[in-house]
Image: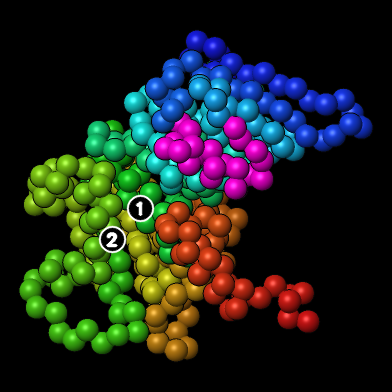
Amino acid sequence: MTAEHLSRTEAATPKSGASDTTHLALTFENNRLASELFGQFDQNLALIEQKLKIDARARGNTVTLRGEEISTNQARRALDYLYDRLLKGASVETSDVEGAIRMALAADDQLVLPTLERKGKMSLAQIATRKKTVIARTPTQDAYIRAMERAELVFGVGPAGTGKTYLAVAHAAQLLERGSVERIILSRPAVEAGERLGFLPGDMKEKVDPYLRPLYDALYDMMPGEKVERALTAGVIEIAPLAFMRGRTLANAAVILDEAQNTTQMQMKMFLTRLGENSRMIITGDPSQVDLPRGVTSGLVEALSVLDGVNGVVTCRFRGVDVVRHPLVQRIVEAYDKKLYPKPDAEE
């Protein structure tokens, strides 16, 4: 940690045999930013205490961490990262603190930049457009963003609230801004989630819009509204109903298929074979929420099995712990998983 930019660290570890408790004193150079880092009434420190089972005491611009060595180092990594965000002009919200804690817990498995970063500092994957920068909040999100950067075909599968669709659209917007692709193609099977919505009026775009709303929301988050509207009008951003994709070759494009668990086997094979030159394809879905008629095999489930191990294909599997919405959503997902997909030893 460099005193000029981050903080000064003082550590005191009791001699072996006396205790396994470690003390770390972090002093942050900027008093105002230190106050923002700790949070109002030290709420950010309280969250770190709760999640990492340590004691964190702030005094002025110094915080003393006390606890098991692994946990105190994880807290240090999280605080380092958050303070660095503040130095770059970003804010620190509760969700950012939770994300930093998740990443600190997995820091040993994360990539670091050995020539630029001091040992142990987190190097988190991010997606940046002119309007917004999105930074990974969980280890799986980190792996997912890195996979989208390097692979031509990426599957992001797992429960709702893990960011798989949002990050896919953000990555597509980034590729478009960079000039790496010429267009974005958004597709989603128009399968009703157990409801009968009846006849939908309007042209094709208006008919499928309700199903594509999450994709639109992410687009407007990453790009200025007027730019999105112009791109839609010009066909740079295209809404392509899955049923009408047959016969096309999608070249120079970022192609996203959302809610892929509701594709049939033939639809999935057809979609996968649309991939053209200089294109990236991202397929997202939750195999536990299939809305197809009973007895119909999900194309996503089959594709994950068939393409396992194929060169150029990467699968990122999100779990309940990766949910970044309200904490209750994570507990709901975990409860359903425990009930519907019990571990083998729980069935005995």
For residue 242, which numbered disc appears in the image? none
As shown in the figure, which amino acid type bears the numbered disc 2? Pro
**x and y percent of residue 225 in the render?**
14, 46
Q: Nearer the viewer, residue 47 or 2?
A: 47
**x and y percent of residue 60 in the render?**
50, 22
Q: Is residue 241 above or below residue 251?
A: below
The answer to whether residue 268 of the structure is visible from this angle is no
Question: Circle 1 — which element?
Answer: helix
- Answer left or right for 189 relative to 316: left
Q: Residue at x 51, y 68 (%)?
A: 333
Q: Quadrant of the C terminus?
A: bottom right
Among the two numbered marks 2 and 1 on one chain, the one whose residue lies closer to the N terminus: 1
Q: Is residue 52 in the magenta section?
A: yes
Q: Which residues are magenta?
A: 37-57
- Answer left or right for 98 relative to 163: right
Which residue position holds label 2? 214
Q: CA distance from mark 2 to mark 1?
A: 8 Å
**x and y percent of residue 130 in the render?**
25, 33
Q: Nearer the viewer, residue 50 or 73?
A: 50
For residue 166, which numbered disc appears in the image? 1
Q: Is residue 181 in the magenta section?
A: no
